[in-house]
Amino acid sequence: MLHSIKAYVNFLLKSTNQHGVHSPFVYDLITTCFYDSTKHQEYKTLKQFRKELYNNSSPITITDFGSGSRVFNSDKRIVSKMAKTSGITSRRAKLLLRLVKYFEPNQILELGTSLGLGTSALSLGNENAHVTSIEGCPETAKIAQQQFDSFKLTTIDLTVGAFEAILPKLTSKTYDFVYIDGNHTKEATLGYFERLLPTVNNATVFVFDDIHWSEGMTEAWDIIKEHPKVTVSMDTFFWGIVCFRTEQVKEHFTIRI
């Protein structure tokens, strides 16, 4: 927690808005997507999706392959409490949806389905995209799939299992958008990044969740943004976003959202 506080203070000192950005690509992304105040129709579905999870009092047993929880100290949890404390926030879900709208990816990969809040945003952002989502916990995945079925989100392919076991089977494909919200450790995050590098194309976007969750995660982010294949990197504090555009001069941005 202390690391996150220090990291946030440092972020505030370095961050800027669109007026401090001289890259046309990043400037357009910020003004058109990040700061888009449009009340998109899909937001209503996101809200209802969340409401149903908030009203779900079912108990489930968690199988945790990641770095653990700062909120729960037991593997017995109530769905509604998980949705309120561990799931992607409403604000970030809307931004995730806008990112998909903006980049219009055809193939999307998500590591860490959880209860499906982020997955629903990915799916609703482009109804023509195919979303592959991986979740390690069978009971959590079951709740997410029930939600997808209830909201008729038919373009989502949910796979249950450890990321390390499933990823090797997916690297023969190319992904346009990758959202990584799984095991928040330095080693795991760098491992996912390296494993998925062969799947990128010139327009691919990677979004890493909680890059300042711990000192290790910040170290992982620093390594990722310096990778030779990464040309554009954006630190929004809660997310790290990287692009692989070969026509772009390598540059890093720290953006307030």
Image (tube, rainbow, N blue to C red):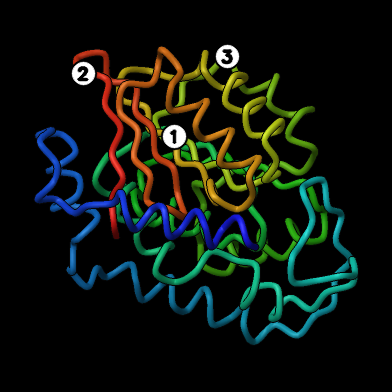
Q: Which residue corresponds to the image point at 27% horizontal and 20% vertical from the top-left? A: 250
Q: Amino acid at mark 3?
A: Ser
Query: Which of the image's four quarters has the C terminus?
Result: bottom left
Label 2 – label 3 distance at C-alpha: 28 Å
Figure check: 140 above or below 233: below
As drawn, the label of residue 119 is none
As drawn, the label of residue 172 is 3
Figure check: 109 above or below 39: above
Q: Quick one: label 1 or label 3, which is nearer the N terminus?
A: 3
Q: Quick one: label 2 or label 3, which is nearer the N terminus?
A: 3
The mark closer to the camera, 2 or 3, is 2
- Describe residue 29's horizontal placement relative to residue 239 as left or right: left
Disc 2 secondary structure class: loop
Q: Are marks 1 and 3 in contact (CB under 8 Å)?
A: no
* Percent position of residue 144, x then y: 66, 61
Residue nearest the observer in this picture, 103 or 144: 103
User: Circle 2: is it few (<14), some (14-19), or many (20+) Cα within 10 Å?
Assistant: few
Residue nearest the observer in this picture, 134 or 255: 255
The residue identified by callout 2 is 249
User: Circle 1: is it few (<14), some (14-19), or many (20+) Cα within 10 Å?
Assistant: many
Disc 1 secondary structure class: strand
User: Circle 3: is it few (<14), some (14-19), or many (20+) Cα within 10 Å?
Assistant: few
Label 1 – label 3 distance at C-alpha: 17 Å
Q: Amino acid at mark 2?
A: Val
